[in-house]
């Protein structure tokens, strides 16, 4: 199985967590796209659910698939969110935001009773940080915010290059919320909770891609099949 087939297999397993009547958070990215696709098949076969998309891209896909949609204003509490991730560590801390949807993804996951994460085997890592950590910032005061992010990281661990995410034509990548993304190449993140706290305290940072204490189940699609890991009970 190639990586895409592994993602689809993980997404197919995640569909089994969906029960009739559920209010669902719908993730963003190539893995979540498989999930939305498969969920759409179930909906067209009669399954009754309602979904809150985490991005404009997922909104368009879910709508095209015929999945009934709502918002967190109409439906502030969700039963289950299914989303991908860029890295997941054994303590279930994660890096998200490779697709630039981290702010909406975190709001939607936080409004959900459960979050099921679907990944291919390359995303399951011993320590977070090989994937550059996305930090979403408001464009106003960008230079000052960048310095403050650097300092905040320095209070917790050694830093690394910070890079403004750009489109192919050299313009800043703009999120669905109208913000920019700084990718922090840290190499390793030994204390995700401490780093999350430090970054959240920086004015101008709208959200960061460290998701801690949110996922309850991780479904990993590997070359030899699917593995489901339940969140370890925290001490
Ligand atoms: O956080 C995300 C988007 O903001 C995605 O879930 C993450 O980037 C994984 O994407 P993919 O499934 O395409 O590998």
Image (cartoon, grey):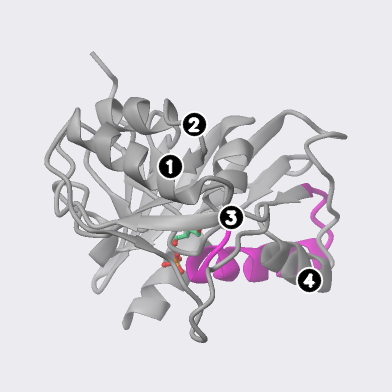
Q: Are marks 2 and 1 in contact (CB under 8 Å)?
A: yes
Mark 3 to mark 2 CA distance (whole Å)? 27 Å
Chain part drawn in magenta: 27-50
Q: Which of marks 4 and 2 precedes in the sequence?
A: 4
State the residue at coordinates (68%, 64%). 58
Q: Which residue is mark 1?
A: 145
Marks 3, 2: nearer the viewer: 2
Marks 3, 4: nearer the viewer: 3
Please give the label number shown on residue 27.
Answer: 3
Give the structural element (helix, strand or loop) at label 2.
Answer: loop
Q: Position of residue 46 (x, y in %)?
A: 84, 60
Marks 2, 4: nearer the viewer: 2
Q: Position of residue 10 (x, y in %)?
A: 43, 62
Mark 1 to mark 4 CA distance (whole Å)? 40 Å
Q: Farthest bottom residue? A: 169
Q: Is residue 209 visible?
A: no
In the drawing, does residue 226 fall left or right of residue 187? Answer: right
Q: Which residue is mark 2?
A: 203
Q: Which of marks 4 and 3 precedes in the sequence?
A: 3
Residue 44 magenta: yes
Q: Which of marks 4 and 1 precedes in the sequence?
A: 4
Marks 1, 4: nearer the viewer: 1
Q: Is residue 213 visible?
A: yes
Mark 2 to mark 1 CA distance (whole Å)? 7 Å
The image shows residue 150, relative to residue 63, as above or below, that is above
Marks 3, 1: nearer the viewer: 1
Quarter that holds the C terminus: top left
Q: Which residue is mark 4?
A: 65
Q: Which of marks 1 and 3 precedes in the sequence?
A: 3
Give the structural element (helix, strand or loop) at label 4.
Answer: helix
């Amino acid at each position: 199985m190639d990586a895409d087939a592994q993602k689809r297999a993980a997404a197919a397993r995640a569909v089994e967590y969906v029960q009739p009547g559920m209010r669902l958070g719908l993730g963003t990215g190539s893995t979540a796209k498989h999930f939305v696709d498969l969920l759409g098949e179930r909906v067209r076969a009669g399954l009754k659910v309602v979904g809150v998309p985490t991005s404009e891209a997922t909104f368009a896909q879910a709508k095209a698939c015929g999945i009934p949609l709502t918002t967190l204003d109409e439906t502030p509490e969700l039963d289950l969110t299914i989303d991908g991730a860029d890295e997941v560590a054994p303590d279930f801390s994660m890096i998200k935001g490779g697709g630039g949807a981290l702010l909406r993804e975190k709001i939607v996951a936080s409004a959900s009773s459960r979050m099921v994460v679907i990944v291919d085997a390359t995303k399951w890592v011993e320590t977070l940080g090989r994937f550059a950590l996305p930090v979403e910032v408001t464009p106003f005061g960008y230079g000052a915010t960048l310095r403050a992010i650097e300092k905040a990281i320095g209070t917790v661990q050694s830093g690394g290059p910070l890079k403004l995410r750009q489109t192919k034509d050299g313009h800043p990548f703009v999120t669905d919320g109208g913000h920019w993304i700084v990718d922090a190449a840290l190499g390793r993140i030994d204390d995700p909770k401490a780093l999350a706290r430090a970054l959240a305290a920086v004015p101008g940072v709208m959200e960061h891609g460290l998701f801690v204490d949110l996922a309850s189940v991780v479904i990993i699609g590997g070359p030899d099949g699917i593995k489901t890991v339940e969140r370890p009970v925290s001490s």
